[in-house]
Amino acid sequence: MRAAFYTLGCKVNQYETEAVAQEFLRHGCLLVSEDEEADVYVVNSCSVTREADRKSRQYLRRMKRRNPDAVTVLMGCYPQTCPDETGSLEEADIVIGTENKLSVVELVERFLKDRKRLDLLTETDDSGVRKRPAGPSGCTVLETEYNDIGAVKSMLGSKRALIKIQEGCNRFCSYCIIPHARGPIRSRSPKSIENEALELLKTGCREIVLAGINTALYGLENGYKNDMEWSSEDLENVRGIEIVVKLLNDLPGDFRIRLNSLEPTVVDRDYLASLLKYGKLAHHAHISVQSGSDRVIASMNRHYTRADYLQMVRTLKAFDKDYGITTDIITGFPGETEADFQESLSLVDECGFLHVHAFPYSERPGTPAASMPGKVPVNVRKERVARLIEAADAASLRFREGLTGTVQRVLPEEYCGDGLWRGRASNYTNVWFEAPAEPDLTSTFVDVTIEKTYKDGVFGRAGAETETIRGTDGAADARKGEQMSDCIFCKIANGGIPTNRVYEDDKIAAFRDLEPQAPEHVLVVPKKHIQSLDQTAEEDAGLLAHIMLKIKEIAKILELENGYRVVINTGADGGQTVPHLHVHLLGKRAMAWPPG
């Protein structure tokens, strides 16, 4: 039997399609591409927009015309939210929703026996009452616990893999049908996630992408239990998505972790800051803002403000000014004025996004927004999208131009021919570089010195030739210096934790503070572990002199021509949060006393 798959929508759908495909393989089926002749065609649908629904119907009809005898399966969010509509689709022989997708093979076998249509969403009990609610007015999902489908060998590229960690959403944004399609929050057990990750790493996987309907909600449902054998302190203090990041970060091997998305209705700048200590976490975050207008954000039932969002962006950029941030923005939401739209445009400029997924508002029946007053004409929505894309392209170009001269750690994904490779940097930028077709580079990271913008990314030269390497994902690099302690500043100074460095030599490292107290706030840290100024000895005099001399050079690098302040906090009562001698270099604001 030959089986083909057509997947619409999010990475969770991609992951689940892989799981179903593996079931077909286990039953001896041959997998073919979606446009080839097949005996079974499976559509894993999306229902974010009515256009997505239309594409599912269109594909089913096209495949039925190609092979009238083929078994066609419609599964996913579309039938889950519109069971009456999909129940009348003659082109679909089997209809299931978002639950129990691994039953598809069994259902196909049942259908082949008697050729009787199967629709799990319109089934009735013995008295003729439908077993499930008939539409989005009530949640149509019956599952209340995470349905673990086991390890999935789901590769996004030769060495990139998805792991699904979470299901469901309880945010109920006014334009979104997905909470009805996917149901309540259900989180996968950490042990199961760890087991799948270990299997993927055995195959040489170098990047793990965490996917979920709303990954930021991981572990936040009532009754969630962390089944990792951690210390009582870790079990007490590590919460939410940080649980997954920590457990993966603790695994051995040179690989990186990428978060598919972070939802600002769930996380804030403090939570982001808590994630940045994990060295394997990629320097990229997809954080959907949807609008730059507080009025529109509130109408969307999204519980944050423009200022909240900007604080998150600034936290990431303070950590690494080349941190890649991508987002989604809707134009023409009901009631959006030109002034509201201008706020979205200005937000794009202010945030400096690497990429913006821009799309016009589309009415989704069953959502509160579909009946809101102040509908924006469709032509205005489209015109605003065009302007938004133009602004987003300009912001992306500025971001990529800023990478010139830096060294990015790239995971090669494909050989493009003519001696050209393409891969992704830690910050998710597409990077092209020249190298022979052999050996295969997809099993290793390559340091690429960026020379210019190129296509929708950048072009560079393989081999690091500058002193500072950005986006190292916690891997070992050329930095020198003996680590004298296990404290966090020792790890930063010696390359164990990546930071936005502005200067480094064999004695010190200087990097931008995560929560700056001035427009320019740099920490200067000796690579030798000295607990505080009170703990220095005569042998440290040369080191202290070196620090003060180099501060002048660092100030020049930061263009602090109008003056700067140097502060050392020392001792238990000196406000020194890390017991490792360090110096604060502050500038680009009026020098007042006391500081603060």
Image (cartoon, grey):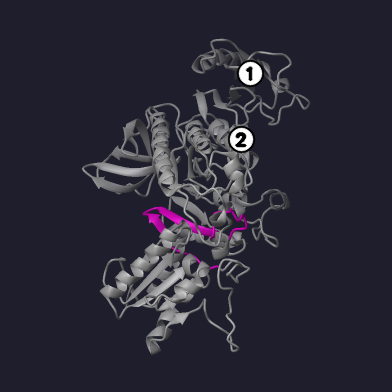
Q: Is residue 163 magenta?
A: yes
Residue 507: % across, % down: 54, 22
Which of pointers 1 and 2 lies earlier in the amino acid sequence?
2
* Residue position for label 1: 540
* Residue position for label 2: 307
Q: Main secondary structure of the magenta part?
A: loop
Residue 538: % across, % down: 67, 15
Is the C-beta separation of discs 1 and 2 under 8 Å?
A: no
Q: Nearer the viewer, residue 575 or 82?
A: 82
Q: Which residues are magenta?
A: 148-177
- Looking at the picture, which amino acid does disc 1 mark? Asp
Q: In the picture shown, does residue 498 fall above or below 137?
A: above
Q: Nearer the viewer, residue 281 or 111?
A: 111
Q: In the picture shown, does residue 78 fall above or below 416?
A: below
Q: Is residue 5 magenta?
A: no
Q: Quadrant of the N terminus?
A: bottom left
